[in-house]
Image (cartoon, rainbow, N blue to C red):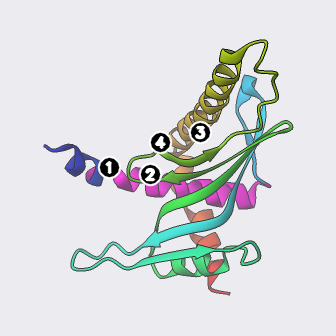
Amino acid sequence: MAVLEKARKTEFMGRDFLLWLWFKSETGDGQFDLGEDGLVEIWFDNMVTLQSESDDRKETIRCSGENCLLKEARFALTREKKITQAMIRLIIEENEWSFVLDSMWFDFRTLKTPKVIQDNRDDPEGLFYEKVLLVEQAVSVINAVFASYIRERLSPEWKSQTLPAMTEWISEGRQ
């Protein structure tokens, strides 16, 4: 099976993860407890792309803007559109990252890390390694949050609590 076919078969997991992440960030004040790694904040930030799942044609909706509060995107969820990309803001203590997370490839696009403040005359390679460390930190956090999603998805509470709460949250988007 070709790589693209495999990605398409498993894309639903990325779409469901993005939906769960959006739901959790809005209903949980953006707080995610990663155990020993501490608390992080994750927010959907000014851009969401949704798509219909019709085989004969694809309809894509992109909602963006600072003041829209993603109202149109929430409404699109009520019309059975699925999230394919979202701009994410990740906050760990005083550091902030911004990136687009894609549902099919689960990749990071336009990743902006916190500023690296270092005098590169003393250690020119240090700037590079600090930037790589910041990229790895963002990837590590998203991996940990994805692991939390998988644990919740496989738990008995998924059908009895999470899914009904998400369904209600989606239906509230009609307003």
Q: Which range of residues does the magenta coloring cover?
A: 9-29
List the single residue furthest toward the right.
94
Three-letter amino acid code of the residue under disc 1: Thr
Residue where numbered disc 4 is placed: 154
Residue 19 in sight: no
Q: Using the rendered view, name the quadrant where residue 133 is placed.
A: top right
Three-letter amino acid code of the residue under disc 4: Leu
Pointer 4 or 3: first along the chain: 3
Pointer 3 or 2: first along the chain: 2
Measured in 3D between alpha carbons, the distance from the residue under mark 1 to the one under mark 4, in whole angstroms, is 16 Å
Viewer-nearest residue: 54 or 62: 62
Residue where numbered disc 3 is placed: 142
List the single residue furthest toward the left.
1
Residue where numbered disc 1 is placed: 10
Three-letter amino acid code of the residue under disc 2: Gly
Q: Is residue 17 magenta?
A: yes
Mark toward the viewer: 2 or 4? 2
Q: What is the crowding at mark 1: few (fewer than 14 residues within 10 Å), some, or many (at least 20)?
A: few
> Residue 41: x percent and y percent?
76, 46
Label 2: element kind: helix
Q: Using the rendered view, name the quadrant where residue 161 is placed.
A: bottom right
Label 1: element kind: helix
Q: Residue at x 36, y 53 (%)?
A: 11
Three-letter amino acid code of the residue under disc 3: Ile
List the single residue furthest toward the bottom.
175
Label 3: element kind: helix
Q: Residue at x 80, y 55 (%)?
A: 29
Label 4: element kind: helix
Pointer 1 or 4: first along the chain: 1
